[in-house]
Amino acid sequence: MANSYKGNEWISISDMMAGVMMIFLLIAVSYMVVISKTEKKLAIQNAELLELNKQMSDIAKTHKDLQTDLYQDLVSEFSKNLERWNAEIDMDNTVRFKEPEILFDQGQKEVKIRFKEILDDFFPRYIKILSQEKYKQDIEEIRIEGHTSTEWQNANTLESRYLGNAELSQARALEVLKYCFSNKQIDAQKQWLISVLRANGLSFAKPLETPELSRRVEFKALTKSNQKILKILNVNQELQNVETSEILEEN
């Protein structure tokens, strides 16, 4: 009986050890499956990040090439006029008219005769460049910006100076837009211009070195690069949201 009891005890321990080994084996297999799934997910995520990075790089290169080409075209077209107009072209393709005495009378919004003559010459040529096939589809906005100095009549508070100049700069930018838009030479592009041409008054939000230089009108062409980058970032956010949901479901 004693030997029989010991034999049964040994069989019970053996069965228990086999069960423990089976549990460890299941844990190991499960761990390997999890690792395999994780590696696959990481590989997919890495491929997605590489693709997003490539898209961002392509957009950056396209934007740089576009900006460079546009700058060269603008300089080539207007270089002989800039000194006479007291204007300049920045590397970001801002065309800046910086002589306040020929733009507007002090505190007034009406475009002066001399500036109208400049706009008659400048604007149709400017639009002819921007409406070329290589630029037109990538133009998001053409901004006419009015800028002022920090001065405003007898105002003695920052708020009154800012708001007074905001109203004036907006009115001036709008008057320039209205005058430019009435030019018969741009009739063929008016439908397109309605979708992209804007008038913005910035008060003294972006002052230059002196009050005189700060009183200016600028023309800026903005491309759709920012939109494309935001679209890519939104796609990336959606991917992250999907991955977070999958993790929560697994847990």
Image: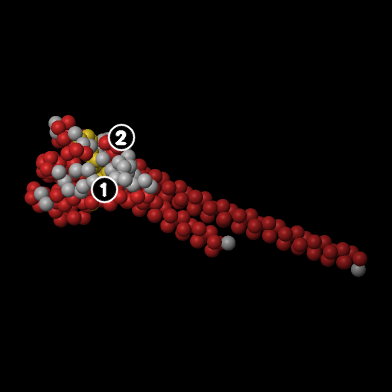
Q: Residue at x 29, y 37 (%)?
A: 211
- Residue 131's tag is none
Q: CA distance from mark 1 to mark 2?
A: 17 Å
- Residue 210's tag is 2
Q: Position of residue 77 (x, y in %)?
A: 15, 35
Residue nearest the observer in this picture, 190 or 117: 117
Would you place residue 177 above or below residue 117 in this image? Answer: below
**Residue 120 visible to an observer of this rendering:** yes
Identified by mark 1, the residue type is Ser
Q: Position of residue 70 (x, y in %)?
A: 22, 39
Identified by mark 2, the residue type is Thr
Q: Residue at x 46, y 55 (%)?
A: 240
The residue tagged with tag 1: helix, strand or loop?
helix
The residue tagged with tag 2: helix, strand or loop?
loop
Q: Residue at x 43, y 47 (%)?
A: 49
Look at the image and tell me in which quarter the N terminus lies.
Answer: bottom right
Residue nearest the observer in this picture, 95 or 69: 95
Tell which residue pokes out farthest to the bottom in this image: 1
Task: Rate crowding at label 1 as few (under 14), some (14 to 19) or many (20 or more) other CA atoms within 10 Å.
Answer: many
**Residue 224 visible to an observer of this rendering:** no
Q: Residue at x 11, y 52 (%)?
A: 182
Name the residue carrying label 1. Answer: 169
